[in-house]
Amino acid sequence: MNYPEGLADKIGFSHVQADIKAACLSQMGIEFAEKMRFSSRFTLVQQWAKQVHEMKQLMAERGGEWPQVDYYDLRPWLAPLSLEGNYLSADQWRDWQRGIEVLYQCIRFFHLLDPETYPELHQLTRQYAQKIAEVSEVDYMQLLPIVQELSRIFDANGQIKESASTELGEIRRKKHAEEQGLRKKLDSMLHQAQQQGWISKDFSLTLRNGRMVIPLAAEHKRKIRGFVQDESDTGKTVFLEPADALTANNEIKSLESAEKREIIQILTRLADRIRPMVPMLGIWMQWLGLIDFIRAKAIWAQEHQAILPHLNDKPHLDWRNARHPLLEKSLEKNGKKIKALSIQLDEKKRLMVVSGPNAGGKSVTLSTIGLLQYLFQSGCLVPIEEGSSMGFFQQIFLDMGDEQNIENELSTYSSHLSNMRYFLQHANKNTLILVDEFGTGTEPSLGGAIAEAILEKLADKGCYGAINTHFGNLKSLADRKEGLFNAAMRYDTAHLEPLFILDMGKPGSSFAFEIAQKIGLPSGIIENARKKLGKKQVDFDKLLLETETEKQIWQSKNKGLSLQNEQVAALKEQYEQLKNHLQEEQKNILNKAKSEAKQLIKEANQRIEQTIREIKEKAAGKEETKILREQLDEFTTKTLKEVPVKPKPAANNSIKPVSGPIEMGDWVAIQDGSAEPTVGQVLEIKGKDALIALGSIRSTLKLKRLQKVQAPKTEKVKTLPMKGIDINDRMAQFSLTLDLRGKRGEEVWVSLDQYINDALLLGAPEVRVLHGKGDGILRNLVREQLKRYAQIKHVQDEHADRGGAGISVVTMR
């Protein structure tokens, strides 16, 4: 059983319920929405959630294939129809024509759904069909003739057609003929009376007491023989039925009575035909309301990007990017985005102790957990990310808000204690508890002690949940008590603003002094408060602040490194593409050159063979042979001019080869065919490969590509390979405080320069340099050195309680 009774309203479930009711198309669906409740039956909740999930999928894929309008509630007329001899009036039948048609189309659509794709919706329709088979011999297919019958009897305005029966058509035709004849006769008499001046020309024929009459001035009523049926309020005008019209009016009245009797016969026959279907219609109307309700929940899920997560029939939470639907909707109206929460509760870490600054999102975290769990166990989908897992609880206990009660003489703290008493009596391993501002409302030390004792007992009971607190003793308890763990709402220490992001695994500071300083509270009051609080608590909050600052630095740097890695990966991909392209081009050029060379050789051989053949055939003499040879030489010269000749590289007199095997430390030249080969020094030999230092670049090459040479005369200093900066190592070893005490002047310059460069590289907003007080020599040396950095905003002494002039606080721009 959930606690307290108004739990649904406290967590905002009633607002979601109102949205779902507004999305319903019928009163039947609204009634189902009003009955939405938290359920402790897992199989039922699972079935509800899957029905909504399938409806959401169905609307996305086939939303226009079944009617989603005109879900009329026909239930009020089912009871009168069930009475023998009873019938409905034509006005009462007005909604039936469209209502029965929509009902038939919906039943047919869901009855024919693929049971493998939509098993829950298909099974739901089958279950209702089975109920009907138990109470009635008719099925939904017999609704179609009723739809056709209603269309035959009633027109689009709900009026009975002349074609509803042969008798009705005959009566209406006779009535129309009599009315036309009577109107013609009375029009003639009216025209005569107007000519005589007995009646105004503005008057026309009218009806009184169901009879057609002539309006006539009262002083002329005896001019025409007939019967006065009515008169005006002033008595100046009478409505006269001429004696000649009496028979026709009587006939019309008789036909009207016959028409009414025939209509009653038609409606009675229609009621008799539908009466056997009343039990079936009652069940199908209930089914239609349920389909409407499921559809409304699916619409709400679409609007809030809610999904069906993995379901577990045990206490458990594994939510990724969970969003409070009401808060998200409110923020969207103001053009803002919600910060999603990722939360995990399991058997080892059941109770989460959430700390952090006021207005940092602690209460929203509790409300999000309570609302989403309540929504799920009411059969709704939940706004979380795919891959999340939803556990199941038998009850939810909530202590949030001020529950003062004047009648029962309960203060805020007494109200909290009453709730805790209920929690301790009824909580178990299947309970989800949510407590806001745990232990507040009384003297802090006493409230903190009682809260700690209660929290220990709740942890022993094995219940799950989250509590919000500012008490340090509860944070400490969460670190050492099995089943408890700390969590904190992240805070921007640079701008002193909440980030509304939940960090699990560590406590958070309330940042009371920092917030007080930001809003402009006098510094003297803040410092006095620090003294009154005590050094231990100040150091604890300071440690939390430094931890949060360092975490933000690492996160910022990691983000930058991730971006750089992405850029490197992109450049590497571009390089690989370019390399492949160049290799392909090189291959094509070589193939083309080989082909052209083969063709030249072929042509040359053909020309030589042709020359030899001509010498032999002609038995040429010396002169003729000389001419043929000159022609061959001319062809050869011409062909060679077309072949590009690679210039022979000029000898580099400064590089002198040396014989003997190549060893580590030798100087070598790379044999790549260039005019001036590149020279480097051997750093290491690995089998058939050698590691070569080429200036500040290292490269691995095959030994067969290298030629041992004399060391260059201009080389005096051995070139060492360039070493990169290990940013991760710098980050791991960096401290926000540099201790220079006991160092000499030149040591101070080197250490301080390296430290400030590291601080700037890592983006530290503020660091401290510990130099001691002494005679002030080391302090002045440090201050002079720090003036050289344009990136430093200002340097000041630390607070007197934390070292004063012995520590310089350096703030970066």
Image (cartoon, helix red, strand yellow):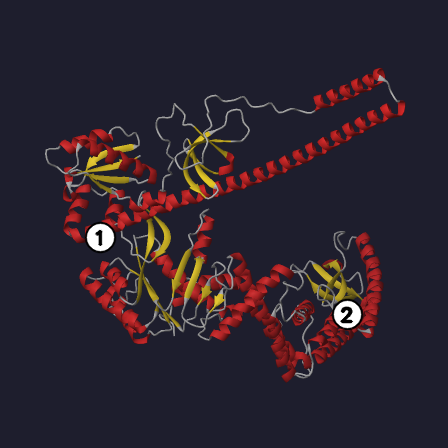
Cβ atoms under marks 1 and 2 closer than 8 Å: no
How crowded is the residue under tag 1: few (<14 C-alpha within 10 Å), some, or many (20+)?
Answer: few
Q: x and y percent of residue 256 in the render? A: 77, 71
Element at label 2: helix
Rounded to the nearest angstrom, the CA distance separating label 1 from label 2 is 85 Å
Which sits earlier in the primary sequence, circle 1 or circle 2?
2
For the question of whether residue 790 can be seen, the reply is yes
How crowded is the residue under tag 2: few (<14 C-alpha within 10 Å), some, or many (20+)?
Answer: some
Q: x and y percent of residue 157 in the render? A: 71, 63
Q: Give the residue at x 14% y 48%.
A: 531
Element at label 1: helix
Q: x and y percent of residue 318 in the render? A: 42, 63
Give the residue number, with chain letter if any, for mark 2.
152
Q: Which quarter of the figure has residue 365? A: bottom left
> Looking at this view, is 30 or 715 the one in front?
715
Q: Give the residue at x 52% y 31%.
A: 671
Image quadrant occupied by the C terminus: top left
Q: Which quarter of the figure has residue 409? A: bottom left
Q: Is residue 447 left or right of residue 221?
A: left
> Looking at this view, is 712 or 582 the one in front?
712
Of circles 1 and 2, which is in front? 1
> Looking at this view, is 696 or 71 the one in front?
696
Give the residue number, with chain letter if any, for mark 1.
540
Q: Give the residue at x 39% y 60%.
A: 343
> Looking at this view, is 362 or 585 the one in front?
585
Could you tell me the amino acid type at mark 2? Arg
Could you tell me the amino acid type at mark 1? Phe
In the picture as drawn, the residue positioned furthest to the right comes out as: 618
Image quadrant occupied by the N terminus: bottom left
Q: Give the residue at x 44% y 47%.
A: 336
